[in-house]
Amino acid sequence: MSSLRVIFDRDTWQEIFGSIGNNKTRTVITIIGVLWGVFIYIALSGSAKGLDNGFESIFQDIAMNSMFVWAQRTSIPYEGFKIGRPIDLKISDVEFLRKQVPEIEFIAPRHTRGAFGGSAGRVKRKNQSNNYNVYGDYPEFTKIATKRIYENGRFINNEDNKYARKVAVIGERTVEELFEKGEEPVGEYIQIDNIYFQVIGVHKYVPGGGFEEDGDIFIPFQTFRKIYNTGDTVGWFSIAAYDDVDVIKVEEEILTALRRRHRVSPQDNRAFGSFNLGEQFNRIMGFARGMTFISLIVGIATLIAGVIGIGNISLISVKERTKEIGIRRAIGATPGEVKVQVVIENVFLTLLAGIIGIVLGAGLLFVVNLATQNMENFPYTNPTVPLIYLGGVVVLMVLLSTLIGLIPAQRAVSIRPIDALREE
Amino acid sequence: MIRLEDIHKSYKMGKSSLHVLKGINVEVNPGELVAIMGSSGSGKSTLLNILGMLDVADRGHYELDGITIKNLNEKRAARYRNNLLGFVFQSFNLINYKSALENVALPLYYKGISRKERQKVAMGLLERVGLKPWATHLPNELSGGQKQRVAIARALVSKPKVVLADEPTGALDSTTSYEVMNLIKEINAEGKTILVVTHERDISQMCNRIIKLKDGEIAEDSLTANGALNK
């Protein structure tokens, strides 16, 4: 009998089920090792994937390769300027940066009242009033950080900026605090620092997306410029690089270009500040990837321990069945056939344990997923184990259990049938 | 059917070696029922093991059904055992988690015969030994005599040239022993060559021929009353 035929032979399985079913308790205890290993592997790598997905969904509203750049004070005297000279970003820097750094896909100059200290805008409607952060924006901003606007509303567009319209996109909390329940805010008017603005949209607050809040108010950049007298300055730039470029390099290029334009020493690292979301994102994704890697190592190590356990029990089982093996050989089983049976038993037990482990692990992931579904702040979404990992673990189980199984298999045929028969 | 010429076998016991078989010459014709007798240590089990290809002689010529048995590796020995020989042991040696039918069918499994065919042939043999109603029973649900009859059915299932029985009645009471021996005789009467190792005189008298071993040599080789009658 060729060994391949043996695997697909129903009789082989009957033989194997016969000898496995012969000692159910031992079989169950044997497979727990592998079962546990695979269970841990599935649970861990699924959770790692869940975290990965969770982070992805938190960051989905922000371009992964985006950054903020703002101006501070110089820290090195340069070209006759004293140390500590305050720098302002200019609107004209937008065109300059576009030319200098072609890797920039979107660049949005922004202003704010309130977000970084200073007084927030005083917003009034009828007899309600409150303070909210006010941002001056171009529509490009939504390319960098998605703003979800409720139906029947819209974000600021280029026309709004061109005519410096007094329109505002307000937050959910603002609606709650300034409007009656059930009242439609879009089209209504609110007062921001005593100037009337028409509400054109309500944005949905998405947590985790940087420093923004659910009460933020967005008005056109040009309107902001007029009412707060900001001249040609810019609060900061929100910049998104193209997807396929190295954001850290782009960040460096932008800072270098700005230093040159604003006559700041090339060594002055403090004149401009920047925050690279892409870098942060990569760091967090690196953490998730590290989790996946650790789960892989832990899972495989546990699996190996489990398979060795099965091999160990198989050795004992072979020893216990010395006589049976002797009988089989006396009535015509070749050493090869005996070996193949022991190895297949080993592989079968391992796979059985593995499959139960996979099912239990998947069950756990399913339950945890259900339990965390409504927890928006918990970065855990759709925990799955990639099929290739699953296939890999199955292949690994077959390989390992075959290799380990060879030891008891060799042991089974190392005793001569005549000695095996004599054993009582 | 069997021809042994000058078979020698010795076992190493530490530094000294024990010469168990000292030149055995035997010829067994087809259809014979031969008892091999001898006190313990006479070498009768060793002889049976060599005949059964479970052990290899140091020296000498062994021919079974015209095939010279030499240069045995385990695989070839297994094939020969499977095709040429049937074994009956003193302690039955049934596999305890397999039913009577499965036990009987097992040699055919190693012969590569289809399941259906195996079941059919095995059932036929169980019927032959009168155990058809017990086909699905496990060995521990059978009496000693029944177990030995299952073992005999198993020994016959692959249609061997020779059946080797090592003290087949050794674990049975006298009534059951006679039943089993009668079965063996019936099977012999159908033409099967059978060798029975025994130390019981009455059992050996039920055979056709008795070979007595003493200290590794054949002390006596004679026909029984039965044998003489048949001739």
Image: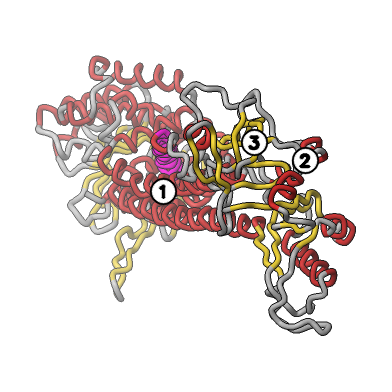
Instruction: Say few, some or many: other residues with alpha carbon within 10 Å of mark 3 (under 14 / 14 to 19 / 20 or more).
Output: some
Between label 1 and label 2, give the one nearer the viewer: 2
Which residue is label 1 attached to? A40
Indicate the position of residue A118 as horizontal and vertical percent values.
57, 58
Amino acid under label 2? Ala
Between label 3 and label 1, give the one nearer the viewer: 3
Residue A357 appears in the picture as rendered: yes
Query: Disc 3, disc 1: CB below 8 Å?
Result: no
Write down the quadrant of residue B92 in the picture: top left
Taking the spot 53% from the left edge, 41% from the top edge, the residue there is A214
Q: Earlier in the sequence, mark 1 or mark 2?
A: 1
Amino acid under label 3? Tyr
Q: Please tell me if label 2 and label 3 are on a single chain.
A: yes
Determine the secondary structure under disc 3.
Answer: strand
User: The C terminus of chain B appears in which quarter of the rendering?
Assistant: top left
Q: Is residue A231 magenta?
A: no
Mark 3 belongs to chain: A
Q: Earlier in the sequence, mark 3 or mark 1?
A: 1
Mark 2 belongs to chain: A
Q: Please tell me if label 3 and label 1 are on a single chain.
A: yes
Taking the spot 89% from the left edge, 58% from the top edge, the residue there is A99
Which residue is label 2 attached to? A164
Residue B109 vs residue A6, the one in the foreground:
A6
